[in-house]
Image (cartoon, rainbow, N blue to C red):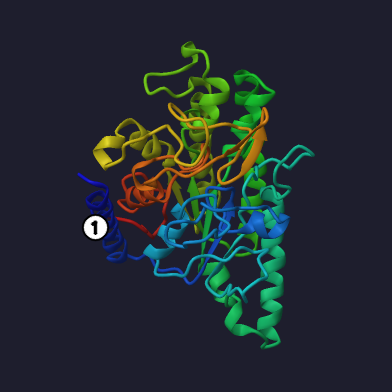
Amino acid sequence: MDSKNVVAFRVVTFCLCLAAANSVDFSYPAVFNFGDSNSDTGELAAAMGFLVSPPNGQNYFLTPSGRFCDGRLIVDFLMDAMKLPFLNAYMDSVGLPNFQRGCNFAPAGSTILPATAASISPFSFGVQVSQFLRFRALSLQLLQEKKFDQYVPTEDSFEKGLYMFDIGQNDLAGAFYSKTLDQILASIPAILLEFETGIKKLYDQGARNFWIHNTGPLGCLPQVVAKFGTNPSTLDELGCVSSPNQAAKAFNVQLQAFCSKLKGQYPDANVTHVDIFTIKLNLIANYSRYGFKQSRMACCGYGGPPLNFDSRVSCGLTKILNGTEITAKSCKDSSVYVNWDGTHYTEAANQHVASQILTGNYSNTLLGDKTPFLL
């Protein structure tokens, strides 16, 4: 199957799943997203002046959009499924952003635990929640004053809206640079306690629909393999580093237990836990079945096979290394690559993940009286 047919097949598959989502109750007036680079639609770029240069955004947007991807993210495809516009970043003030149907508080590099001096992003989960609380208060004030009604969510939207979460990857992946696996496993309860604190604040402000992604197979990212997989004994049968995936699995088990606890504490809440780990690992293990040709090599990078990743030069940038000018360039056809830049997935992979989410096969049953997805 050539690349054009592969793209057509994926579009048809996604549309079928989207039709299934539309056939049941999946109607929310607004979406409020919290996370990291997996769902950052321009927050870090706007807040920190972070350069997200071409070829990021080369597909769909045809220009950098603040996303660390060649095109759309999972959250973008899910917004399509809800027939809602893409989320504007909370900190983005350029172009008259409209927040009537929701807002995105997720910046790349963010963690659940409070940021440190070494953090890429100062906007940890607690800060994002605080930003939301300010956003909500100011929105309600503007509505009361009958100002800019068309740009902010209605009061009803804050209660009936969907609260999405995709965060925790950086808490685990970043820790491997300074901690042992045992130390990281021991830190997971503290991470989830911080997450619980933020969720409770949102609930107290009227949030009732919680959509929570677990974390993906960290050990399969080219960045992680390049750093921690130089010894073959550290790799599993897929060529992924075992210990980060062990940490991700442990985190996910405890996250699912937290979701069950959350549903018990708040019977009137709809709590959806989505198994992103299984979807992504299945894609990496069976990539050719889904029309991909590369599962672990970055499309945009430097160094060539097997990983095409060099931590010294990020996607789209040019640097002088050992007296030679090098550029981390994009591959010719990103639609056949699972990984985009060593850390993030391509638009094609994101579309595949979204299509699998839309089947409902990877969501648990802690949904109260609403089942968003069913195929």
Residue 28 vs 340, above or below: the answer is: below
Which amino acid, mark 1? Val
In this orientation, which residue lies closer to the viewer: 59 or 209? 59
The N terminus lies in which quarter of the figure? top left
Residue at image coords 72%, 55%: 48
Q: Residues within 10 Å of mark 1 (few under 14, many from 20)?
A: few
Secondary structure under the numbered disc 1 in the rendered image:
helix
- Across and down, in percent, residue 355 comes to 33, 52
Where on the picture, by quarter, is residue 115?
A: top right
Q: Is residue 63 visible?
A: yes
Left or right of residue 333: residue 153: right
In this orientation, which residue lies closer to the viewer: 157 or 131? 131
Left or right of residue 90: residue 265: left
In this orientation, which residue lies closer to the viewer: 97 or 162? 97
Q: Is residue 375 visible?
A: no
Where on the picture, by quarter, is residue 100?
A: bottom right
Residue at image coords 47%, 43%: 340
In this orientation, which residue lies closer to the viewer: 367 or 279? 279
Q: Which residue is mark 1?
A: 12
The C terminus lies in which quarter of the figure? bottom left
